[in-house]
Image (tube, rainbow, N blue to C red):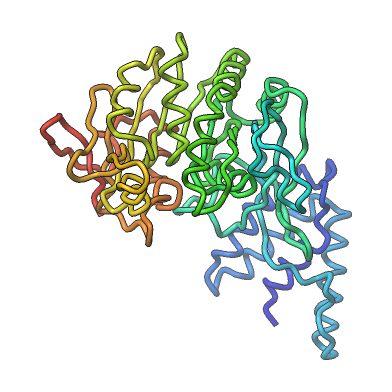
């Protein structure tokens, strides 16, 4: 019998859904101890198991319940009895809390929360997303941010929501509990449901080890590959409400920076707002694979009326989704997120060409899914490193000026 598996499953079986003071006090140390047990070599497993038990001993009631669960599993194994379902835990998770704003219409569909219908008002709330512990990109065994410890149980979708009346009060409460003061706003692209947008935002916060508050702006995408034209109209239709959201967020932020990551069609929404709102001062602004007419992107950048610490554009010549959206049946115009001929290079914006990065079949979601790109954004947001100080980037020249290419 795998004693480490028995120990982990026993912890998962008794760990409370809403930890009290005793469990909360040991939670960070327990997360570290469980991660060390995961990574332990055969000759270090016993030491790692002892560390988990030592941490649990600081919470006597929880420790006793874990020991009872272990004893039940071991006795059952000796007698050939199948492990009780209550002790079978599929996976350990980290729970990430985010805020959201949306102009989608609520839906009665189970576990969807909001649909593709357009609302004329904004709705706000918080979401909690449970991500698998093995999800983290890169070797970060002890992240700066300590997420909440969760275990997946039968019927658990790993997602829960709570609506709120006010975005500023929601964000303020979350900032009071977060280690950092910065905000990270994510604007999703085409073919994204509300639930997938929530999960993507939580994933970004987790992978970037973001220690402030992550905020999702979710516009009414139909969440269907066949709804490109409808999504284009929805992106245009959300502009006024996004400006309301942005103004509310900026006016309620008295300290810390506000960073933005927009993906795909979400760049239409963000760039329009930045070209029409005056006086803002932002942190880092990332335009990831913009599904936006390249000439329109150039025009909007020229009209940006505020300032940001750094604007960064990620492009990829292998992005088949942008190749399709820029073709004659749809937009019939090159997209700002495409590399190669017509590469967008502008003063005041760092263009990063990711064409040599392995990006999957469609090559469109690389900025959120590929370790190389996520790591580059991490260095930018956490350390304010310009491109020449970030490893893996090579300086290149185009007819319009210098840009950077990610080395494979």
x%, y% of residue 186?
A: 52, 35
At 67% from the left and 52% from the top, the residue drawn is 130
Task: Where is residue 178? Give x, y as percent.
Answer: 65, 31
Q: Quadrant of residue 145?
A: top right
Percent x, y for residue 80?
Answer: 82, 90
The reply to whether residue 214 is in sight is: no
- The percent position of residue 20, horizontal first and vertical second, equals 85, 43
Left/right placement of residue 239 relative to residue 380 reads right
Relative to 356, 307 lies left or right:
right
Q: Quadrant of the N terminus?
A: bottom right
**Residue 95 appears in view:** yes
Q: Which residue is painted at 58% across and 44% down in the image?
A: 197
Which is more toward the observer, 208 or 40? 208
Number of marks in picture? 0
Please determine whether, in this image, residue 25 is positioned above or below residue 138.
Answer: above
**155 lies above or below 271:** below
For the point 31% across and 40% down, which residue is it?
A: 335
Q: Is residue 151 left or right of residue 292?
A: right
Q: Which residue sits furthest left?
A: 399
Quarter-of-image position of residue 170 = top right
Taking the spot 69% from the left edge, 25% from the top edge, the residue there is 121
Task: Name the outermost residue toward the bottom.
Answer: 80
Compare residues 141 and 231 and report the one nearer the observer.
Answer: 231
Residue reaching furthest to the front: 329
Q: Considering depth in this image, is 256 or 143 the residue closer to the camera?
A: 256
């Amino acid at each position: 019998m795998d004693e480490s598996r028995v120990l982990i499953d026993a912890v998962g079986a008794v760990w409370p859904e809403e930890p009290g003071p005793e469990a909360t006090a040991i939670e960070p140390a327990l997360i570290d101890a469980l991660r060390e047990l995961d990574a332990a070599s055969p000759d270090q497993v016993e030491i790692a198991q002892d560390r988990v038990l030592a941490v649990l001993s600081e919470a006597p009631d929880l420790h006793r319940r874990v020991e009872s669960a272990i004893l039940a599993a071991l006795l059952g194994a000796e007698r050939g009895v199948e492990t009780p379902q209550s002790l079978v835990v599929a996976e350990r998770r980290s729970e990430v809390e985010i805020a959201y704003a949306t102009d989608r219409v609520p839906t009665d569909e189970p576990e969807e929360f909001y649909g593709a219908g357009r609302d004329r008002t904004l709705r706000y709330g918080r979401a909690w997303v449970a991500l698998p512990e093995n999800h983290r990109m890169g070797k970060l065994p002890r992240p700066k941010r300590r997420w909440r410890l969760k275990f997946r149980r039968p019927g658990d979708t790993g997602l829960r929501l709570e609506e709120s009346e006010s975005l500023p009060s929601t964000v303020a409460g979350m900032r009071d509990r977060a280690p950092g003061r910065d905000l990270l706003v994510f604007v999703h692209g085409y073919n994204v449901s509300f639930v997938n947008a929530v999960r993507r935002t939580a994933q970004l916060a987790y992978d970037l080890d973001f220690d402030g508050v992550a905020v999702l702006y979710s516009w009414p995408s139909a969440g269907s590959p066949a709804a490109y034209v409808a999504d284009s109209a929805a992106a245009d239709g959300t502009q006024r409400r996004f400006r309301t959201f942005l103004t509310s967020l900026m006016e309620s932020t008295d300290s810390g920076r506000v960073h933005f990551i927009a993906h795909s069609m979400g760049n239409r929404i963000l760039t329009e707002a930045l070209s029409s709102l005056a006086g803002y001062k932002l942190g880092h602004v990332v335009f990831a694979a913009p599904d936006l007419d390249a000439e329109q992107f150039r025009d909007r950048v020229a009209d940006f009326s505020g300032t940001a610490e750094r604007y960064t554009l990620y492009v990829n010549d292998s992005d088949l989704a942008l190749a399709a959206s820029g073709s004659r049946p749809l937009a019939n115009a090159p997209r700002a997120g495409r590399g190669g001929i017509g590469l967008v290079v502008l003063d005041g914006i760092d263009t990063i060409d990711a064409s040599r990065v392995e990006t999957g079949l469609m090559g469109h979601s690389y900025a959120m899914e590929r370790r190389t790109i996520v790591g580059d954004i991490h260095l930018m947001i956490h350390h304010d490193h310009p491109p020449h100080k970030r490893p893996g980037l090579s300086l290149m020249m185009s007819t319009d000026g210098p840009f950077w290419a990610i080395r494979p």
